[in-house]
Amino acid sequence: MYPWLDRSGRLSPLKLLVFIGLFLPGAWAAGNLALGMLGPRPITECIHEVGLWAIRFLFISLAITPFRQIFQWAPLIQLRRMIGVAAFAYALTHLSLYVVDQSFDLKKVVLEITLRFYLTIGFVALLGLSALAVTSTDGMVKRLGGRRWRRLHQLSYGIGVLASIHFFLQMKADVGEPMVMCGLFAWLMGYRAAVAWLIKKGPMPIWSLALLSLAAAALTMLGEAAYYWFKRGVDPLRVLHANLTFDIGMRPGLLVLVIVFAVTLAAILRLALKSGGRLRFASAGE
Protein backbone atom coordinates (compact mmCIF):
# COMPACT_ATOMS: atom_id res chain seq x y z
CA MET A 1 0.00 0.00 0.00
CA TYR A 2 1.24 3.45 -0.89
CA PRO A 3 2.24 5.57 2.12
CA TRP A 4 -0.16 8.38 1.19
CA LEU A 5 -3.21 6.09 1.39
CA ASP A 6 -5.19 5.34 4.54
CA ARG A 7 -6.07 1.82 5.65
CA SER A 8 -9.17 1.80 3.45
CA GLY A 9 -7.04 2.55 0.39
CA ARG A 10 -8.25 6.13 -0.02
CA LEU A 11 -6.02 9.17 -0.42
CA SER A 12 -5.18 10.77 2.93
CA PRO A 13 -4.34 14.48 2.49
CA LEU A 14 -2.58 14.46 5.87
CA LYS A 15 -0.37 11.49 4.98
CA LEU A 16 0.37 12.91 1.53
CA LEU A 17 1.38 16.28 2.98
CA VAL A 18 3.67 14.65 5.57
CA PHE A 19 5.11 12.27 2.96
CA ILE A 20 6.11 15.21 0.76
CA GLY A 21 7.44 17.11 3.78
CA LEU A 22 9.77 14.25 4.71
CA PHE A 23 11.70 14.78 1.47
CA LEU A 24 12.16 18.53 1.86
CA PRO A 25 15.18 18.55 4.24
CA GLY A 26 17.02 16.10 2.01
CA ALA A 27 16.15 18.08 -1.10
CA TRP A 28 17.33 21.28 0.60
CA ALA A 29 20.66 19.68 1.55
CA ALA A 30 21.13 18.18 -1.93
CA GLY A 31 20.29 21.47 -3.61
CA ASN A 32 22.72 23.45 -1.46
CA LEU A 33 25.39 20.83 -2.08
CA ALA A 34 24.86 21.03 -5.85
CA LEU A 35 24.95 24.83 -5.76
CA GLY A 36 28.11 24.93 -3.64
CA MET A 37 26.41 26.73 -0.75
CA LEU A 38 27.65 24.50 2.08
CA GLY A 39 31.01 26.16 2.70
CA PRO A 40 34.56 24.89 2.26
CA ARG A 41 33.69 21.35 3.42
CA PRO A 42 30.36 20.72 1.70
CA ILE A 43 30.20 16.94 2.20
CA THR A 44 30.94 17.28 5.92
CA GLU A 45 28.27 19.95 6.28
CA CYS A 46 25.80 17.77 4.38
CA ILE A 47 26.64 14.82 6.65
CA HIS A 48 25.83 16.92 9.71
CA GLU A 49 22.61 18.32 8.24
CA VAL A 50 21.24 14.94 7.16
CA GLY A 51 22.23 13.34 10.48
CA LEU A 52 20.48 16.12 12.39
CA TRP A 53 17.27 15.48 10.47
CA ALA A 54 17.56 11.76 11.18
CA ILE A 55 17.47 12.56 14.92
CA ARG A 56 14.67 15.08 14.46
CA PHE A 57 12.51 12.61 12.59
CA LEU A 58 13.22 9.92 15.18
CA PHE A 59 12.08 12.25 17.95
CA ILE A 60 9.03 13.37 15.96
CA SER A 61 8.05 9.72 15.57
CA LEU A 62 8.39 9.30 19.34
CA ALA A 63 6.20 12.37 19.84
CA ILE A 64 3.30 10.89 17.86
CA THR A 65 1.86 8.84 20.74
CA PRO A 66 1.98 11.68 23.33
CA PHE A 67 0.53 14.18 20.84
CA ARG A 68 -2.21 11.76 19.78
CA GLN A 69 -3.24 11.37 23.41
CA ILE A 70 -2.82 14.99 24.41
CA PHE A 71 -4.71 16.44 21.44
CA GLN A 72 -7.09 13.48 21.08
CA TRP A 73 -6.30 13.29 17.36
CA ALA A 74 -6.41 9.63 16.34
CA PRO A 75 -5.22 10.13 12.69
CA LEU A 76 -1.78 11.08 13.98
CA ILE A 77 -1.01 7.42 14.63
CA GLN A 78 -1.04 6.82 10.85
CA LEU A 79 2.08 8.98 10.54
CA ARG A 80 4.33 7.23 13.04
CA ARG A 81 5.53 4.43 10.76
CA MET A 82 6.20 6.79 7.85
CA ILE A 83 8.22 9.22 9.96
CA GLY A 84 10.15 6.40 11.65
CA VAL A 85 11.16 4.94 8.27
CA ALA A 86 12.22 8.44 7.18
CA ALA A 87 14.47 8.64 10.26
CA PHE A 88 16.13 5.39 9.15
CA ALA A 89 16.50 6.64 5.55
CA TYR A 90 18.18 9.85 6.70
CA ALA A 91 20.44 7.94 9.11
CA LEU A 92 21.49 5.57 6.32
CA THR A 93 22.16 8.54 4.04
CA HIS A 94 24.18 10.09 6.88
CA LEU A 95 26.43 7.02 6.95
CA SER A 96 26.59 6.81 3.15
CA LEU A 97 27.78 10.41 2.92
CA TYR A 98 30.44 9.63 5.51
CA VAL A 99 31.65 6.79 3.27
CA VAL A 100 31.78 9.25 0.36
CA ASP A 101 33.71 11.73 2.51
CA GLN A 102 36.24 8.97 3.22
CA SER A 103 36.72 8.42 -0.53
CA PHE A 104 34.91 5.05 -0.34
CA ASP A 105 37.72 3.59 1.76
CA LEU A 106 35.57 0.99 3.52
CA LYS A 107 38.48 -0.35 5.55
CA LYS A 108 39.09 3.12 6.98
CA VAL A 109 35.37 3.59 7.64
CA VAL A 110 35.16 0.33 9.58
CA LEU A 111 38.29 1.23 11.54
CA GLU A 112 36.94 4.68 12.38
CA ILE A 113 33.61 3.25 13.55
CA THR A 114 35.46 0.72 15.69
CA LEU A 115 37.88 3.18 17.29
CA ARG A 116 35.76 6.32 17.71
CA PHE A 117 33.17 5.90 20.46
CA TYR A 118 30.67 8.41 19.08
CA LEU A 119 30.81 6.69 15.68
CA THR A 120 30.36 3.30 17.31
CA ILE A 121 27.19 4.27 19.15
CA GLY A 122 25.91 6.07 16.05
CA PHE A 123 26.37 2.88 14.03
CA VAL A 124 24.61 0.82 16.71
CA ALA A 125 21.71 3.29 16.57
CA LEU A 126 21.59 2.84 12.78
CA LEU A 127 21.45 -0.95 13.19
CA GLY A 128 18.56 -0.51 15.59
CA LEU A 129 16.72 1.75 13.15
CA SER A 130 17.33 -0.85 10.43
CA ALA A 131 15.60 -3.51 12.53
CA LEU A 132 12.63 -1.22 13.14
CA ALA A 133 12.37 -0.24 9.46
CA VAL A 134 12.47 -3.85 8.27
CA THR A 135 9.71 -4.86 10.71
CA SER A 136 7.51 -1.81 10.10
CA THR A 137 5.20 -3.47 7.57
CA ASP A 138 1.75 -4.89 8.33
CA GLY A 139 3.04 -8.30 7.29
CA MET A 140 5.79 -8.20 9.92
CA VAL A 141 3.30 -7.11 12.57
CA LYS A 142 1.20 -10.19 11.82
CA ARG A 143 4.25 -12.46 11.65
CA LEU A 144 5.70 -11.28 14.97
CA GLY A 145 2.42 -10.82 16.76
CA GLY A 146 1.26 -7.57 18.27
CA ARG A 147 2.92 -8.00 21.66
CA ARG A 148 6.33 -9.07 20.30
CA TRP A 149 6.19 -6.33 17.67
CA ARG A 150 5.50 -3.66 20.29
CA ARG A 151 8.35 -4.91 22.46
CA LEU A 152 10.73 -4.86 19.52
CA HIS A 153 9.74 -1.32 18.60
CA GLN A 154 10.36 -0.15 22.14
CA LEU A 155 13.99 -0.30 21.01
CA SER A 156 13.27 3.17 19.64
CA TYR A 157 13.68 4.51 23.20
CA GLY A 158 17.21 3.13 23.49
CA ILE A 159 17.98 4.27 19.96
CA GLY A 160 16.91 7.76 21.00
CA VAL A 161 19.43 7.65 23.86
CA LEU A 162 22.22 6.50 21.54
CA ALA A 163 21.35 9.11 18.92
CA SER A 164 21.38 11.86 21.56
CA ILE A 165 24.80 10.78 22.84
CA HIS A 166 26.16 10.52 19.29
CA PHE A 167 24.90 14.02 18.46
CA PHE A 168 26.26 15.46 21.70
CA LEU A 169 29.73 13.91 21.42
CA GLN A 170 30.32 14.92 17.82
CA MET A 171 29.69 18.59 18.62
CA LYS A 172 33.07 20.02 19.57
CA ALA A 173 32.12 23.62 20.36
CA ASP A 174 28.52 24.72 20.79
CA VAL A 175 26.46 22.01 22.50
CA GLY A 176 23.31 24.13 22.60
CA GLU A 177 21.31 22.16 20.06
CA PRO A 178 22.26 18.74 21.45
CA MET A 179 21.17 20.02 24.88
CA VAL A 180 17.81 21.05 23.44
CA MET A 181 17.36 17.65 21.81
CA CYS A 182 18.26 15.90 25.08
CA GLY A 183 15.74 18.05 26.95
CA LEU A 184 12.97 17.23 24.48
CA PHE A 185 13.88 13.54 24.64
CA ALA A 186 13.65 13.73 28.45
CA TRP A 187 10.13 15.16 28.04
CA LEU A 188 9.13 12.36 25.65
CA MET A 189 10.43 9.65 27.96
CA GLY A 190 9.07 11.37 31.05
CA TYR A 191 5.62 11.40 29.49
CA ARG A 192 5.79 7.68 28.84
CA ALA A 193 7.07 6.98 32.34
CA ALA A 194 4.23 9.00 33.87
CA VAL A 195 1.65 7.15 31.78
CA ALA A 196 3.13 3.71 32.51
CA TRP A 197 3.96 4.04 36.21
CA LEU A 198 1.97 6.93 37.68
CA ILE A 199 -1.19 7.58 35.71
CA LYS A 200 -1.74 3.98 34.50
CA LYS A 201 -5.48 4.31 33.92
CA GLY A 202 -7.78 7.18 33.21
CA PRO A 203 -7.09 10.70 32.00
CA MET A 204 -3.84 12.58 32.55
CA PRO A 205 -4.35 15.90 34.36
CA ILE A 206 -3.09 19.11 32.82
CA TRP A 207 -1.02 19.88 35.88
CA SER A 208 0.97 16.68 35.29
CA LEU A 209 1.93 17.84 31.81
CA ALA A 210 2.89 21.28 33.12
CA LEU A 211 5.02 19.71 35.85
CA LEU A 212 6.69 17.43 33.32
CA SER A 213 7.49 20.46 31.16
CA LEU A 214 9.15 22.22 34.10
CA ALA A 215 11.12 19.08 34.95
CA ALA A 216 12.40 18.65 31.36
CA ALA A 217 13.50 22.30 31.21
CA ALA A 218 15.18 22.06 34.62
CA LEU A 219 17.06 18.91 33.60
CA THR A 220 18.25 20.67 30.45
CA MET A 221 19.53 23.63 32.45
CA LEU A 222 21.26 21.41 34.98
CA GLY A 223 22.74 19.28 32.21
CA GLU A 224 24.23 22.29 30.45
CA ALA A 225 25.56 23.70 33.74
CA ALA A 226 27.18 20.34 34.59
CA TYR A 227 28.74 20.06 31.12
CA TYR A 228 30.39 23.49 31.22
CA TRP A 229 31.49 22.94 34.81
CA PHE A 230 33.22 19.59 34.15
CA LYS A 231 34.42 20.40 30.64
CA ARG A 232 35.52 24.03 30.96
CA GLY A 233 35.39 24.88 34.64
CA VAL A 234 32.61 27.45 34.24
CA ASP A 235 30.69 28.33 37.41
CA PRO A 236 27.39 26.37 37.18
CA LEU A 237 25.47 29.31 38.65
CA ARG A 238 26.54 31.48 35.71
CA VAL A 239 25.18 28.92 33.27
CA LEU A 240 21.93 28.54 35.21
CA HIS A 241 21.53 32.32 35.31
CA ALA A 242 22.12 32.51 31.55
CA ASN A 243 19.33 29.98 31.06
CA LEU A 244 16.89 32.22 32.91
CA THR A 245 17.67 35.46 31.06
CA PHE A 246 18.08 36.67 27.48
CA ASP A 247 21.45 38.35 28.13
CA ILE A 248 23.26 36.03 25.69
CA GLY A 249 20.26 34.84 23.73
CA MET A 250 17.86 32.00 24.43
CA ARG A 251 19.75 29.16 26.11
CA PRO A 252 18.76 25.47 25.74
CA GLY A 253 16.82 25.16 29.00
CA LEU A 254 14.65 28.16 28.24
CA LEU A 255 14.09 27.00 24.66
CA VAL A 256 12.98 23.57 25.87
CA LEU A 257 10.63 25.27 28.34
CA VAL A 258 9.09 27.38 25.57
CA ILE A 259 8.58 24.37 23.28
CA VAL A 260 7.04 22.00 25.83
CA PHE A 261 4.91 24.69 27.45
CA ALA A 262 3.63 25.62 23.99
CA VAL A 263 2.38 22.03 23.77
CA THR A 264 0.77 22.36 27.21
CA LEU A 265 -0.92 25.64 26.35
CA ALA A 266 -2.16 24.27 23.03
CA ALA A 267 -3.63 21.29 24.88
CA ILE A 268 -5.34 23.59 27.40
CA LEU A 269 -6.83 25.70 24.62
CA ARG A 270 -8.05 22.69 22.68
CA LEU A 271 -9.64 21.06 25.69
CA ALA A 272 -11.18 24.29 26.87
CA LEU A 273 -12.79 24.85 23.48
CA LYS A 274 -13.97 21.26 23.14
CA SER A 275 -15.09 20.33 26.62
CA GLY A 276 -16.03 23.63 28.22
CA GLY A 277 -13.17 23.74 30.73
CA ARG A 278 -12.82 20.05 31.68
CA LEU A 279 -9.05 20.15 31.38
CA ARG A 280 -8.20 16.46 31.31
CA PHE A 281 -6.71 14.38 28.53
CA ALA A 282 -8.23 11.33 27.01
CA SER A 283 -7.09 7.89 28.07
CA ALA A 284 -3.39 7.75 28.71
CA GLY A 285 -3.07 4.18 27.47
CA GLU A 286 -0.92 3.37 24.40
Image (cartoon, rainbow, N blue to C red):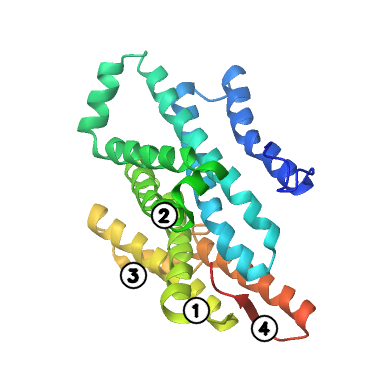
Residue 154: image quadrant is: bottom left
Q: Label 4 amino acid?
A: Leu
| Quadrant location, the N terminus | top right
Name the N-terminal-most of marks 2 and 1.
2
Q: Residues within 10 Å of mark 3 (few under 14, many from 20)?
A: few
Q: Which mark is residue 211?
A: 1
Q: CA distance from mark 3 to mark 1?
A: 23 Å
For residue 226, what is the image quadrant?
A: bottom left
**Against 235, is 284 above or below?**
below
| Circle 4: element type | loop
Density class for disc 4 (Cα within 10 Å; few <14, some 14-19, many ≥20) is many
Task: Look at label 1 and name its amino acid.
Answer: Leu
Secondary-structure class at tag 1: helix
Mark nearer the N terminus (3 vs 1)? 1
Chain-order first, disc 1 or disc 4:
1
Q: Which residue is mark 4?
A: 279
Q: Position of residue 12 (x, y in %)?
A: 77, 46
Rendered position, 182 above or below 218: above
The kind of residue on which mark 2 rests is: Arg
Label 1 crowd bin: few (<14), some (14–19), many (20+), radius 10 Å: few
Real-space CA distance between mark 2 and mark 1, rounded to the nearest whole angstrom: 33 Å
Which of discs 4 and 3 lies nearer the camera? The answer is 4
SS at badge 3 = helix
Instruction: Identify the residue position indicated by label 3 in the image.
Output: 237
Disc 2 target residue: 148
Q: Indicate which disc, 4 or 2, sits on the residue closer to the N terminus.
A: 2
Mark 1 and mark 3 in contact (Cβ < 8 Å)? no
Give the Cα distance between marks 4 and 3. 36 Å
Which of discs 4 and 2 lies nearer the camera? The answer is: 2
- Distance, label 4 to label 2, CA atoms, is 35 Å
